[in-house]
């Protein structure tokens, strides 16, 4: 009978006891559970609440002011930026506008046909034009 008990002790009890010790010790080395992480972070970070806001943007004009050549500008100059990007620049002479248009074609790929450059420059010279050809140029020529 004693021999049977001894066998039970060695075969079953000892491994179970070893397993229990390993589980207690090992549990200290387990990664932090997601629930525990959330709890710890909730203590660190105050809650954040989002609310809806209304923003009124200034009105902008999507079309160039009507005039001879405005259709060229409307067709080629507003797919990348607003009309304001063009109209709120310092006034330029027609030849300076030509350089600016060539920059838009060459550097940025504006799809304007070459034979419309002059007509567009004349139009921009009217809506945002500078009379004198003298003085420093307002454009940096990056056309080529
Ligand atoms: C393919 C896109 C694209 C098209 C089309 C385009 N532009 Fe631009 N334009 C730009 C970019 C990008 C800038 C900003 C460049 C910079 O910051 O140097 C710009 C800036 C400008 C400026 C501000 C001055 C400058 O050189 O930065 C003017 C004026 C201008 N564009 C005029 C025009 C005109 C006129 C047309 C029509 C022929 C036109 N753009 C078409 C991309 C475009």
Image (spheres, rainbow, N blue to C red):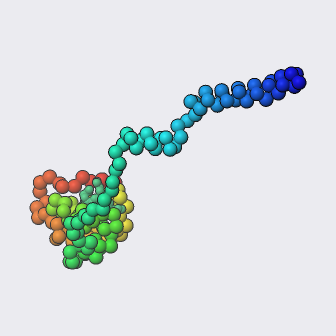
State how many labels appear. Answer: 0
Question: Quadrant location of the N terminus?
Answer: top right
Side of 29 where 121 appears, left or right: left
Residue 119 appears in view: no
**Residue placed most toward the observer, 136 or 62:** 62
The residue at 19%/60% (across/down) is: 89
Q: Position of residue 136 (x, y in %)?
A: 14, 52
Side of 130 where 85 appears, left or right: right
The residue at 67%/30% (across/down) is: 20
The residue at 47%/41% (across/down) is: 37
The residue at 83%/22% (across/down) is: 6
Side of 48 where 55 appears, left or right: left
Q: Within the image, what quadrant is residue 119 found in?
A: bottom left
**Residue placed most toward the observer, 53 or 126:** 53
* Ligand 1: quadrant of the figure: bottom left
**38, above or below 26, in the image:** below
Q: Position of residue 4 (x, y in %)?
A: 87, 25
**Residue placed most toward the observer, 20 or 110:** 20
Q: Position of residue 31 (x, y in %)?
A: 55, 35
**51, above or below 83, in the image:** above
**Residue placed most toward the observer, 92 or 26:** 26
């Amino acid at each position: 009978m004693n021999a049977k008990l001894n066998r039970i002790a060695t075969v079953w009890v000892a491994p179970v006891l070893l397993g229990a010790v390993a589980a207690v010790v090992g549990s200290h080395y387990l990664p932090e559970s997601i629930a525990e992480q959330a709890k710890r972070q909730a203590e660190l970070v105050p809650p954040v609440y989002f609310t809806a806001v209304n923003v009124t943007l200034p009105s902008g004009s999507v079309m160039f002011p009507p005039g001879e050549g405005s259709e060229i500008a409307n067709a080629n100059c507003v797919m990348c930026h607003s009309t304001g990007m063009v109209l709120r620049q310092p006034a330029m002479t027609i030849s300076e506008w030509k350089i600016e248009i060539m920059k838009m074609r060459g550097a940025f790929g504006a799809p304007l046909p070459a034979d419309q450059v002059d007509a567009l420059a004349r139009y921009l010279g009217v809506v945002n034009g500078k009379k004198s050809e003298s003085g420093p140029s307002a454009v940096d020529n990056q056309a080529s």
